[in-house]
Every structure is written in C-alpha cells, then in structure tokens.
C-alpha cells in the first residue's frame, strides 16, 4: 500500500512556525502521512518562480499525492486534479502557469462566513488535503471552479534573426533557466551558428553538460566563461563556472537575454 503523501511548496521561510503547524495538523489527521518539503524559500508573492518549481518538482510524484502550494495566496482558494495528482492553492495565476492544460477538474473551496483565513494553508488547505488522502472526491469538497485565472507570459520572442529569451528561474547557484527548451532551440536554429550575449559576455556553443576545462581552479576573471547548456528540466540554462551569473549580471526572472543567429 502506498504511503499517503503531501508536499509543501511555500514562501514561508525556514525560521517560523508555519511548517510545523501544518505538519502537525496533517499527522494528527492522517495516520502514516509522509510530508515532503519541496521548498519554503521561494520569494514572497513571486508567482512566476513558484510556478516553475511546481511544474518541475511536483509533477513527478506518484498518483494521488496532494500538493499544498502557499505562495501569494488569496481568495479564491481551489483544489484541482492534474495527471492523477491533487493541488490545493489559490487561483492567483500560479495553477495555470504551472499546470497548463493538464488540469482535469477544479473546485472552489468554500470559506465560512466570519472565518479567519490569514493562514489559509493551515485553516483550509490542510483539512482539505486530509480529506483527499482519506478518500474524498473533489466534487465532495466544493462547487466546480470556473476557468482558471490566466497570467500572460511568453518565454521568447522572435525578431528576424534575433530571439529575445526571458529568464524563468534563478537557482541557488545563480544559474539562469531560460524560457526556451532544447527542442525549440534546435528547431529554430536549423543548424545555424549563433551568439548569445549577456552584458559584455558571449557564448556561441551549446554544451550538454557543465564544461570544466582542465582540472585546475580558475585563476583569472577570463576563466569564468559563460556557458550555455541544457538543464535537468530540458530548458536552456546559462551558467558561469564556479560563480553566480545572476549576482554578476543582475539577471532575474522576467529579465531577458539576446540570441542572434549568424
């Protein structure tokens, strides 16, 4: 029998009591529940980064896993099913960005008149997660939810022989994950040489892993060359050897880089 599993993806930080409250309530309600911390270090209210994390970190769990997502949450609160898993969150644009057209069913979660929901993950999401783990159906938990809120976002824009590619995510190493995947890049490239520029740095080759020339540590700033590779998510990734690209260049989600085909 599979262990009942809940994941937590939040902007709570790691110093407070929030995660402890939610985990305790889940463990009281569901015997043997496994609670997995995806991350509590997301930037507060950053829907774009949160959607990236949910898309790539949550969707690989087994069927019937329940994912509690609390980033920039406000009403309406919803529960939905996508690819056999459940997500409990706010309809603030994050579900549509993270899950796209894979959503199979969604319900609006009822809130009591006079209820206090300034920590909805505890007062509302946790009881709903417990009910799902104990066998409840989505239709038992609320009324059908109308169309999810759509947040417009474009990964890249073609401009003749140029492509402006937007940054989707910055990891803890300062590497930039771009809004174009490897297959899209190769289709647009059609074998042509290219140059991708970030400030005064350029890269003109795609590597399928981080390049480490030689075995010595870099000794000059010129040794910290810009690298374009393919991330574990399948998207193009920009990195510097042993340095933070984001810190050096100021790249952040929604900023852009320019790629030119020769």
Image: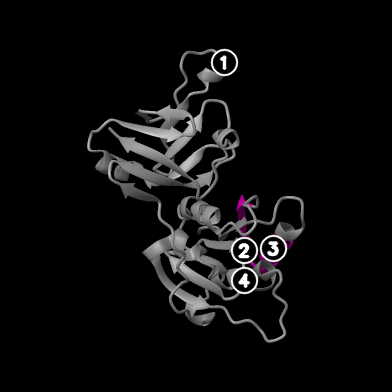
Could you say which quadrant of the image residue 71 lies in? bottom right
Q: Position of residue 23 (x, y in %)?
A: 69, 60
Dot 3: element: helix
Question: Viewed as shown, does residue 67 lie left or right of 152?
Answer: right
Dot 2: element: loop
Which residue bears the numbered disc 1?
Answer: 220
- The answer to whether 215 is drawn above or below residue 249 in the figure is above
Residue that appears at 69% across and 72% down: 123
Colour treatment of the image? one colour
Q: Is residue 32 magenta?
A: yes
Cβ atoms under marks 2 and 1 closer than 8 Å: no
Q: Mark 3: few, some, or many residues within 10 Å (few <14, many ≥20)?
A: some
Which residue bears the numbered disc 2?
Answer: 72
Q: How many marks?
A: 4
Precedes in sequence: disc 2 or disc 1 = 2
The residues tagged by marks 2 and 1 sit, at their Cα atoms, a distance apart of: 42 Å
Cβ atoms under marks 3 and 4 closer than 8 Å: no
Precedes in sequence: disc 3 or disc 1 = 3
| Region in magenta | 21-39
Cβ atoms under marks 1 and 4 closer than 8 Å: no
Q: Taking the image as drawn, is residue 252 in sight?
A: yes
Cβ atoms under marks 4 and 2 closer than 8 Å: yes
Nearer-the-camera pick, 186 or 142: 186
Q: Is residue 51 magenta?
A: no
Dot 1: element: loop
Q: Position of residue 134 (x, y in %)?
A: 56, 71
């Amino acid at each position: 029998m599979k262990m009942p599993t809940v994941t937590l993806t939040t902007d709570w930080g790691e110093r407070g009591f929030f995660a402890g409250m939610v985990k305790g309530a889940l463990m009281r309600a569901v015997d043997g529940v496994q609670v997995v911390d995806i991350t509590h270090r997301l930037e507060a209210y950053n829907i774009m980064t949160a959607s990236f994390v949910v898309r790539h970190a949550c969707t690989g769990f087994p069927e019937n896993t329940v994912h509690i997502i609390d980033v920039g949450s406000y009403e309406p609160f919803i529960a939905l099913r996508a690819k056999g898993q459940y997500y409990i969150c706010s309809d603030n644009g994050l579900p549509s960005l993270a899950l796209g057209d894979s959503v199979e069913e969604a319900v609006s979660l009822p809130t009591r008149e006079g209820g206090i929901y300034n920590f909805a993950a505890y007062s509302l999401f946790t009881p709903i997660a417990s009910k799902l783990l104990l066998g409840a159906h989505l239709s038992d938990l609320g009324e059908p939810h109308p169309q999810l809120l759509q947040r417009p976002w474009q990964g890249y824009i073609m401009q003749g022989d140029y492509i402006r590619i937007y940054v989707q995510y910055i990891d803890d190493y300062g590497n930039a994950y771009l809004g174009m995947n490897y297959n899209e890049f190769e289709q647009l490239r059609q074998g042509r040489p290219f140059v991708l520029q970030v400030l005064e740095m350029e890269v003109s080759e795609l590597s399928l892993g981080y390049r480490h020339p030689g075995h010595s540590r870099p000794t000059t700033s010129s040794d910290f060359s810009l690298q374009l590779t393919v991330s574990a998510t399948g998207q193009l990734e920009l990195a510097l050897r042993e340095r933070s690209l984001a810190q050096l260049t100021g790249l952040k989600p929604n900023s852009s880089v320019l790629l030119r085909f020769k």
